[in-house]
Image (cartoon, rainbow, N blue to C red):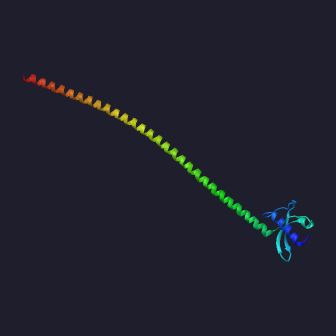
């Protein structure tokens, strides 16, 4: 296999795995190696251990820095997705809380109106009872006053009669 063919097959294989790989397609764990080539001295990469024994098969190969860049991009996308979710949830919570606040205010207003009506009815009843009591007291006082006036007239009349008989 020529080096350009090998490089293109590696490139195809390398790009098919996104992010930091954990296993090869064959199910084997990956090993980290350092390149010993003139173009990539000591450049680190992931490689399936089987690939060293079976060089004709295409097993996983991926440069570590590419895997880390892929992983960083995936994490950033997930982060942005979570930020959007949090914003959406925050908006929904604010809506829900505002709705609950309106409902509670409405319930409180209704309860206040009910209490106010009860207090008004009770005050009206107490006022009517007080007015009735005042009327009874006024009648009693009027009756008592009339009795006093009648007794006074009787006493004055008796005195006048006695005086008239004595003088006359």
In the rendered image of this protein, does residue 101 appear above or below residue 11? above
Determine the image quadrant of residue 45.
Answer: bottom right
Where is residue 124? Give x, y as percent: 39, 37
In the rendered image of this protein, does residue 22 appear above or below residue 7? above
Left or right? Give the position of 96 relative to 14.
left
Q: Nearer the viewer, residue 35 or 132?
A: 35
In the rendered image of this protein, does residue 126 appear above or below residue 108? above
Where is residue 96? Give x, y as percent: 59, 50
Where is residue 16? Give x, y as percent: 81, 63
Q: At 49% from the left edge and 45% from the top edge, which residue is drawn?
A: 109
How many numbered dots are placed on residues in this image? 0
Q: Nearer the viewer, residue 64 or 109?
A: 64
Where is residue 74? Give x, y as percent: 74, 63
Left or right? Give the position of 92 relative to 115.
right
Q: Nearer the viewer, residue 2 or 57?
A: 2
Q: At 63% from the left edge and 54% from the top edge, which residue is drawn?
A: 89
Position of the N terminus, as image quadrant, is bottom right
Q: Which residue is most to the left? A: 168
Q: At 65% from the left edge and 57% from the top edge, which residue is drawn?
A: 86
């Amino acid at each position: 296999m020529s080096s350009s063919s090998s490089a293109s097959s590696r490139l195809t294989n390398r790009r098919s795995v996104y992010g930091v790989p954990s296993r090869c397609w064959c199910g084997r764990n990956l090993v980290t190696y350092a390149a010993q080539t003139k173009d990539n001295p000591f450049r680190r990469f992931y490689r399936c251990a089987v690939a060293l024994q079976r060089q004709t098969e295409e097993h996983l190969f991926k440069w570590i820095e590419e895997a880390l860049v892929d992983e960083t991009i995936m994490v950033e996308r997930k982060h942005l997705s979570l930020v959007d979710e949090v914003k959406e949830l925050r908006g929904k919570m604010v809506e829900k809380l505002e709705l609950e606040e309106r409902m509670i205010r409405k319930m409180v207003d209704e309860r206040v109106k009910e209490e106010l009506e009860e207090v008004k009815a009770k005050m009206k009843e107490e006022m009517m009872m007080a007015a009735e009591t005042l009327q009874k007291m006024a009648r009693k006082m009027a009756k008592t006053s009339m009795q006093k006036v009648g007794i006074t007239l009787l006493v004055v009349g008796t005195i006048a009669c006695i005086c008239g008989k004595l003088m006359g």
